């Protein structure tokens, strides 16, 4: 997968998260988790673009690490949403969880490769 394809997947994931958040029940928990997942789910796309302009290899690894952290946060948030039954469209939730899991794997591998290239 090239940089542009990964960027597009992250943008698509961010859009999916916005759609997911719009489907929540309108209550305190729904509003809170909607805000939280919108922040963590859109952040990786924005930070990935920043990583592409990193000033050094260490800066690149750091920014990719931020993406990974936000993706992991999004995954846990999706699990909470599922457990709390805040959303009725299960297929969309399963799809988002599958995609974030794949993105996490991609970032773990990319960071490992970048760290190995530093040595």
Image (tube, grey):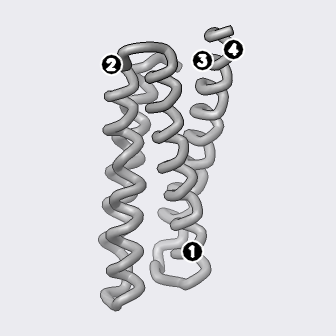
Which of 60 and 52 lies nearest the eye of the viewer?
Answer: 60
Quarter of the rendering containing residue 97: bottom right
Establish if 55 lies above or below 101.
above
For this view, does 59 lie left or right of residue 116?
left
- What is the spatial separation of the Cα atoms under label 3 and label 2, in whole angstroms? 15 Å
Which label sits in the foreground, 3 or 1? 3
Q: Give the labeled residue for mark 4.
A: 116
Of labels 1 and 4, earlier in sequence is 1
Q: Which numbered disc, 3 or 1, marks the residue that appears first in the sequence?
A: 1
Report which residue position mark 1 lands on.
80
Separation of marks 3 and 4 at Cα, in angstroms: 5 Å
As measured in the structure, the alpha-carbon distance from the residue carrying label 1 to the one carrying label 4 is: 35 Å
Q: Which residue is mark 3?
A: 114
Between circles 1 and 2, the one closer to the viewer is 2
Q: Secondary structure at mark 4?
A: helix
Of residues 39 and 59, the one nearer the viewer is 59
Instruction: State the mark number for residue 53.
Output: 2
Location of residue 64 in the rendering, given as x and y in whole percent from the top left corner:
49, 31
Label 1: element kind? helix
Tell me if label 3 and label 4 are in contact, CB under 8 Å: yes
The answer to the question of whether label 1 and label 2 lie on touching residues, with beta carbons closer than 8 A, is no
Task: Kindly check if marks 4 and 2 are in contact, taking CB atoms under 8 A apart as contact.
Answer: no
Label 3, label 1: how far apart the Cα atoms are: 32 Å
Q: Residue at x 32, y 51 (%)?
A: 15
* SS at badge 2: loop
Q: Which residue is pictured at 53% across the width and 57% down the height?
A: 73
Upstream in sequence: badge 3 or badge 2: 2
Left or right: residue 20 versus residue 2 is left
In the rendered image of this protein, does residue 49 appear above or below residue 19?
Answer: above
Q: What is the crowding at mark 4: few (fewer than 14 residues within 10 Å), some, or many (at least 20)?
A: few
Vertical relation: 73 (above or below) 65: below
The x and y percentages for residue 31 are 33, 80
């Amino acid at each position: 997968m090239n940089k542009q394809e990964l960027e597009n997947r992250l943008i698509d994931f961010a859009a999916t998260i916005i759609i997911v958040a719009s489907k929540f029940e309108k209550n305190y928990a729904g509003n809170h988790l909607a805000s939280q997942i919108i922040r963590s789910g859109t952040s990786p796309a924005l930070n990935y673009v920043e990583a592409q302009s990193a000033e050094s290899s260490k800066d690149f690894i750091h920014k990719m690490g931020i993406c990974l952290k936000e993706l992991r946060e999004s995954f846990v948030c999706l699990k909470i949403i599922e457990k709390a039954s805040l959303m009725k469209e299960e297929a969309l939730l399963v799809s988002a969880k599958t995609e974030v899991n794949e993105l996490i794997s991609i970032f773990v591998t990319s960071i490992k490769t970048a760290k190995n290239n530093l040595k």
